[in-house]
Amino acid sequence: MSKCIICNSETNSLIDSQIRVTHSHCDNCGFIYKDKEFHLSLDIEYENYKMHNNSFESEGYVQIFVNLLNDYIKPLNINGKILEFGSGPGPVLKELLLREGYDVFDFDPFFNKNMDYLKHKYQLITSTEVVEHFVEPLKEFEHLSGLLAKDGYLLLMTRLRTMDTNEFLNWWYRRDLTHISFYTLKTFEEIGKKYGLKIVKTNNVNIIIFQKI
Ligand SMILES: [Zn+2]
């Protein structure tokens, strides 16, 4: 069997007959990774993202970010730069942050390829509904950690999976064909250990905040 791409432990194969894909599942950190042969091509991935209704026209979508801003971002008392990483076709969170007077940069590998964001260090990096799309999570987290200022925060929004693999095989979140990396809190702890990131807050559902130590 292959090794876990996060913690290097043994994995076992998880057959998902409903959506006809296989995943590798790590018994140690709980990371589940969709097998490479089932990853979408970049073109098809792009087409999928364009269809997402992620804009100010979607009221429910905007409310999610208003809540994130009020409940999680404002309490961090950020007064430096913020990076919205993976901001997508309609950068709602970026716009909300700008309206609050924050100094915001954004980057998206499909919709905003401006590389100027690499010139700065950030007091906060937000990445919402992004890390589940990562093909090479460690590489991405190393990159993000390297962009954080000392004591800076990395705020992720992604659905945490439970440790129960049967539940996973019935979970709506896995059905999105662009979702390939599924994390538990333990997975995030393993990632944090590698790149000097400590989990300082989580709602145990879909929001995780790391601080650079
Ligand atoms: Zn693992």
Image (spheres, grey):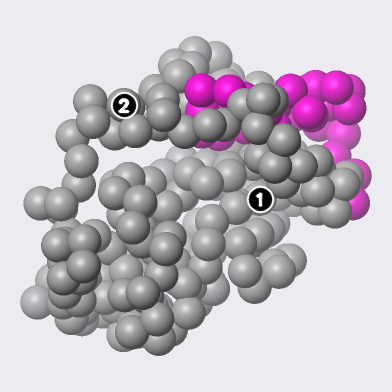
User: Residue 24: percent from the left, percent from the top?
Assistant: 21, 71
Residue 97 painted magenta: yes
Q: Amino acid at mark 1?
A: Leu
> In the picture, which quadrant includes the N terminus?
bottom left
User: Residue 5: percent from the left, percent from the top?
Assistant: 27, 63
Q: Residue at x 69, y 67 (%)?
A: 202
Residue at label 1?
Answer: 155
Which label sits in the foreground, 1 or 2?
Answer: 2
Residue at label 2?
Answer: 47
- Of the two numbered discs 1 and 2 on the same chain, state the one appearing first in sequence: 2
Q: Residue at x 41, y 70 (%)?
A: 171
Q: For the residue labelled by badge 2, is the local secondary structure a helix, a strand or a loop?
A: helix
Q: Is residue 88 visible?
A: yes
Q: Quadrant of residue 197?
A: bottom right
Q: Any atom of ligand 1 within 8 Å of the CB at mark 1?
A: no
Residue 31 painted magenta: no
Q: Quadrant of residue 56?
A: top right
Q: Nearer the viewer, residue 109 or 62?
A: 62
Q: Which residues are magenta?
A: 75-103
Q: Is residue 5 visible?
A: no
Q: Residue at x 48, y 79 (%)?
A: 162
User: Is 151 on the left-hand or right-hand side of 44?
Assistant: right
Q: Nearer the viewer, residue 102 or 198?
A: 102
User: In the drawing, what numbered circle is on residue 34?
Assistant: none
Q: CA distance from mark 1 to mark 2?
A: 26 Å
Q: For the residue labelled by badge 1, is the local secondary structure a helix, a strand or a loop?
A: strand
Query: Is the residue 70 above or below the residue 3 in the image?
Result: above
